[in-house]
Image (tube, grey):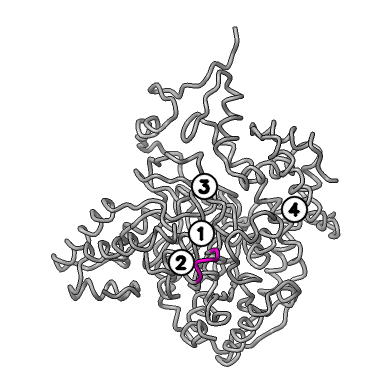
Amino acid sequence: MATNWTIDGVKEALASKKISARELSADFYKRIEAKNPELNAYLALTPERARRQADKIDDLVAAGKPLPPLAGVPVAIKDVISTRGTKTTCGSKILENYIPPYDATAVERLEAAGAVILGKTNCDEFAMGSSNENSAYGPVKNPAAPDRVPGGSSGGSAAVVAAGLAVASLGTDTGGSIRQPGSFCGIPAMMGSYGRVSRYGLIAFASSLDRIGPLATNVKDVAAILQVIAGRDPHDSTSTTAPVADYRAELAKPVKGLRLGIPKDYFAEGMDAGVRKKIEAGIEIFKKMGCELIDIRMPHTDYAIATYYIIATAEASSNLARYDGVRYGLRVDDDSLLAMYRKTRGAGFGAEVKRRIVLGTYVLSAGYYDAYYLKGQKVRALIAQDFRDAFTKVDAILTPTSPVPAFKLGERTNDPLQMYLADIYTVTGSLAGVPGISVPCGKIDGKLPVGLQIFGPAFGEARVLQLAYAFEQAGGAAV
Amino acid sequence: MKISREDVLRVAELAYLDLSEAELETYRAQIDEILEYIGKLNELDTANVEPMAQVLSSDQQADATLREDLIVPCAVAEDVLKHAPDPEAPYFRVPKVIER
């Protein structure tokens, strides 16, 4: 049976009765059974839920009724996104047995659109990490190179799609956690603007940065998933009423004449030579398509990592206060309430999470708030201004997604600062709230995938997708 | 040195987080290095910059999108308690807080 399914391919096969939704999901489970023990990309499977949903789709087919946009499409959900009745661990021991009493809005919308949820994917604990090595349930391996990391934190969501164990997946992005694993695993991966997709049911890491978004094997499928999950949700007051464009209808619009900014600040020292070569070749493709390349400056880029690790850890220290052993998750007993809190949190959180709670609490604490947190918020404003200034001159911005290709498992685990610096090109867009996609841009030595990042202005998802699609159609993945 | 052992202890106390001796020293050294790096923000003059607390523009903020205050059914109490570490419906039970 074919393994390279697309959303259109599934729809066509179902409508022409070449396969039933039930057979299709069963086939995916067979492949998962064979490959997942090696990859460790799925943490939990949901075969009963999948069968119920597949049967609904097969009933529609049998009755000759119209099929919803994602009918029968097998998808995977990152384990920081709540699924009713299915364990949602956040890759943490503190939530090892947590079963949410409700579905995240994005999950609910995927199922309402006909998608079949196969299971939950591995990730860095509470989405904190760039390699998936911070999961309490073991690292994920990169399907393109099994001795290397898949990226993170949505490493499992990228690996299952790249390995053909799901047609698409949901990840979350706080500082690059969708785009960077997409780049490392060689698939397109997107975060919409802050406020574009409801965060209801997304277990919070840093609330002013967290976003849910799609990973898929091709840009058209990324657009189709984003279409379904985007839009206002009364359960999330930061989800906006800004109209959602018809992304798939806009995909094929010509890109000729569009102005693309190349920020010099992203091409400074520290970039792997192989990545640089591929990105330059990728940019050349846009030139050949008739886009106008414009050199721009984004002068605060170099301050983004420092800013990000203040804001993100401060918000995390506050959000993670809820894990106190009282209402859900792990409890380590003690006769005193305060000692119970301390022991529960000390035993339940992993090293990276504890490090960030300590750092985040410190930058918010009396005497340090102004020097760190307030300073971080001010520089964040300057970084956002860099983007607004750039978008007065250009329609989109091209950068590498990551300065390096997938690195070897264990290579960076002892040096948190080095790990943080790998997020240098992605955190800027996170802080500014703009949409960004990573699209495959060749492979180093024919093996290690490189991702090209496209940023658009706030709520400019259609433009970002249009450029990514044109790049893909022009052979960007094979530069 | 930006952060001392006492600082880490104080912060861990604020965050109700038990740390082992080994964790204490490892995190102190790593966070020290991170704070050293963060210090580069002081190169920027931000005296006249408004802090940015969130990204949405004023017409998209929560006060522009508040729903009506309506009571809607939300019968999840049973589900929630079922998975609590020590439930006694309709309560969560915790160790004694007030000593007599």
Q: Which residue is mark 4?
A: A376
In magenta stretch: residue A409: no
Q: Residue at x 59, y 73 (%)?
A: A453
Q: Nearer the viewer, residue A427 or B74?
A: A427
Quick check: marks 2 and 3 in contact, CB under 8 Å? no
* In the depicted structure, whether residue A36 falls above or below residue B90: below
Query: Which residue is disc 1 drawn over?
Result: A154
Q: Main secondary structure of the magenta part?
A: loop
Any mark on residue A136, and which? 3
Q: Disc 4 or disc 3, which is closer to the eye?
A: 3
Q: Residue at x 37, y 38 (%)?
A: B72
| Pointer 4 or 2: first along the chain | 2
Disc 2 residue type (three-letter) = Leu
**Amino acid bearing label 4:** Gly
Q: Which residue is the site of mark 2?
A: A215
From the viewer's perspective, tell me whether residue A282 is left or right of residue A113. Answer: right
Q: Quadrant of residue A270?
A: bottom right
* Subunit of label 3: A
Horizontally, residue A241 falls left or right of residue A317, namely left
